[in-house]
Image (cartoon, grey):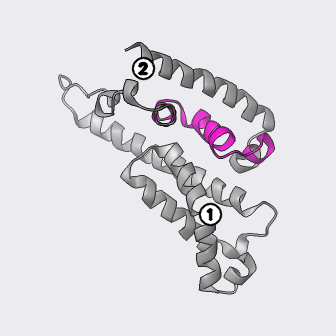
Amino acid sequence: MVEKAKQNDRQAFQLLVQRHEQQVRATVLGMLGPVAEADDVAQEVFIRFFRSLDNFRGDAQLTTYLSRIAINLSLNELKRRQRAQKRFLFWQRSDTTIPDPADEHADPARMDDQQLVRQALQYIDADYRSVIILRLLDGYSVKETAEILDIPMGTVASRLARGLDKLKEVIVRWKAM
């Protein structure tokens, strides 16, 4: 299919998108949470893939390649959010308080386990979040996760352990409320 898509076969590319759309969306939603930008980032993954079709050599599986694009674009979006928030905070008066993000979401006590984990993921560092999503939610091996993130396998293992500890802290704190 990839070879056909490289030869400008639109149906082949459309089939590739259909086959991998759910996985890409799950990865992006895991990184960004259920926000409007998630759909835009997921769509951008396929736009970037289309533009780089000629560069795809097939050294990695297509799912691995698309996951790498999804993670990188999600990290870019998270950085954009941080810059926007810093600008926002700079312009706020000192006596204005920023609402706690947890107040804007559903009560953690009413969420099912999967919703709770996905929501809690949004409160841990993106480096840990990306490893947890790829390893535990998307089901990639340690080696595949290392390839996608371009980090050593030992770093994957340590980030997974630390990330799970941080995730547990968030969930325990919420349940104690």
| Mark 2 residue type | Trp
Position in image of residue 160 (x %, y %): 68, 30
Q: In which quarter of the image is residue 12?
A: bottom right
2 relative to 95, above or below: below
Position of 126 relative to 147 (above/below): above
Residue at which label 1 appears:
20
Q: Residue sitting at 37 percent across and 28 percent down?
A: 110
User: Does the magenta segment cover residue 128?
Assistant: yes
Task: Please say if the residues under marks 1 and 2 sit with CB atoms less than 8 Å apart.
Answer: no
Residue density around tag 2, few if under 14, some if 14–19, many if 20 or more, within 10 Å:
some
The answer to which quarter of the image holds residue 111 is top left
> Which residue occupies 29% across, 28% down?
103
Q: Let me know if residue 125 is in the magenta part.
A: yes
Q: What element carries label 2?
A: helix
Q: Which residue is drawn at 61% across and 21% down?
A: 165
Horizontal side of residue 102 vs 160, given as left or right: left
Give the amino acid type for the residue marked by disc 1 in the picture. Answer: His
Image position of 143 with respect to 103: above or below: below
